[in-house]
Structures are given as C-alpha cells and as structure tokens.
Image (cartoon, rainbow, N blue to C red):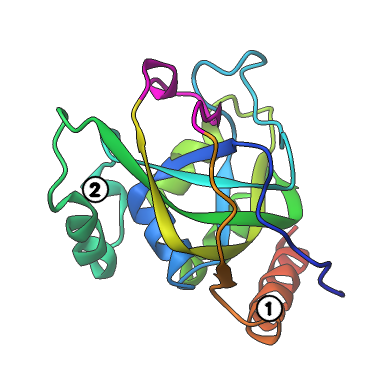
Amino acid sequence: MSMKTVTQPESTLSLKEWAVAVKALGEGKQIITVRKGGLYEETREFKLENDTFYLYPTYEHQKAEMVKEENQSDLAATLEGWSPEKTTVEIQYFARITDDVETLSEATLRALDPYHIWTDDFADVRLKWKKTKPLHILFARVYRLHRPITIEIAEEYKGCKSWHNLLNNIPQEAYSPVLSEEEYEEKRKEIIEIIEKNE
C-alpha cells in the first residue's frame, strides 16, 4: 500500500477518544481504535466523517477497569492535572485513517488483544452494543503537532458524540508522523493478516 501525501487538516473535524487511547496512538503503541458510535449520534451508529481529523482527548468517561493493567500508568498520566472543572483541552495530534474494517467477530477482537490497550470487557461492550451493527476497526496513522493547540472546552464538545467540529481555527503548524511509513505499514499488515484469518 502506498501512503498518500498527508497535510494537516484544514477542517476542524475531531474524533473524541479517551485520553489514554490518544496517548497510546500518539506514542505509536497502537495504530487501531474501535468504534460503534456515540450514544447520541444522529444515526446511533458510527460513520467515518472524513479520513483525516484531529484527535480530541476526553477524560471524564475513562474507566480504569477497561484499561489493561500494563497501561494503568498511562491512564494515571493522562489524569495528572485534570479535573472536572478544567476549562481547556490540548489538541496534540491528527490522524489519517488508512483502513476502516468492519467486524462482528468476537474471535477477531480476541486475536487483536496484543494490539491495543483495552481489556476484553471493553472490547466486548463495544462489540455487543447494538449487536447487529458491525464494529469499525480504524487504522490510524497519527501525526504529532510540534506545537500543541490549547482550546476552550465548549458545551458543544460535551456528551457522548464521536465527532465534533471544533469552534476554534487550528493554526497550520509543523508536524511529524508518530511512526515512519515502514513502521506503520509493518504493523498494519500484521493486523490485517490477523483479521483475515479470524473473519
């Protein structure tokens, strides 16, 4: 697969994700995230709005029991200095989705266990909620902004929705890929092969 040239998003579209997952994606510890939709999506199911978008870290809904023991320190790190009264959030990353793979297979999720930070319980909850709808396994090549952007937390950003159009313009800044093209492609191929074997 050839990687297309990626530019920082001109749109302010952002995907809301647990801060610990954003950290894992931003440090290259994982390249996948799984979605089935927020509770308040218009269609009650997940739709990939665009293939390139910012990652908006959310803190209030993180559950320690849904994160693997070996990633608990990462979860704790995201909560340092955070409180429910905090009025700003920092945008550090954007992502381009290279693959959007749908699955209804529990075997596939079990096989992907080494490639993400979540417990089996977390994966099961996502798979079994609205069980007739497939789970989206999103492959995200992530880019780090050299200068993170701090924005005010607007009321519009709250609640269980996957997507937000940020009210602030995001300056076009220098950025770097978290993983090289070779590193990303090696991980991508490995995971794709596992999915194909288990579907």
Q: Position of residue 133 (x, y in %)?
A: 68, 29
Could you tell me which residue is drawn at 59 percent across and 50 percent down? Answer: 106
Secondary structure mainly formed by the magenta segment: loop
Left or right, residue 19 beside residue 192: left
Which residue was labeled with disc 1?
Answer: 190
Q: Nearer the viewer, residue 182 or 93?
A: 93
Q: Pick the quarter of the image with the N terminus.
A: bottom right
Left or right, residue 185 beside residue 58: right
Is residue 126 covered in magenta?
Answer: no
Left or right, residue 75 beside residue 22: left
Amino acid type of the residue that numbered disc 2 sits on in the rendered structure: Glu
Could you tell me which residue is drawn at 41 percent across and 56 percent down? Answer: 148
Q: Position of residue 128 (x, y in %)?
A: 53, 34
Does residue 155 show up?
yes
Vertical placement of residue 103 versus 117, above or below: above
How crowded pointer 1 is (Cα within 10 Å; few <14, some 14-19, many 20+) is rated as few
Q: CA distance from mark 2 to mark 1?
A: 27 Å
- Residue 1 image label: none
Per the rendered image, the range of residues in magenta is: 154-168
Vertical placement of residue 192 versus 50, above or below: below
Callout 2 secondary element = helix
Q: Residue 87's image quarter?
A: top left
Does residue 119 show up?
no
Q: Which of the two discs, 2 and 1, labels the residue nearer the N terminus?
A: 2
Could you tell me which residue is drawn at 59 percent across and 72 percent down? Answer: 177
- Residue 65 image label: 2
Q: Position of residue 92 (x, y in %)?
A: 43, 56
Amino acid type of the residue that numbered disc 1 sits on in the rendered structure: Glu
Is residue 164 covered in magenta?
Answer: yes
Q: Pick the quarter of the image with the C terminus.
A: bottom right
Asked whether disc 2 touches disc 1, contact meaning CB atoms under 8 Å apart, the reply is no
**Total marks placed:** 2
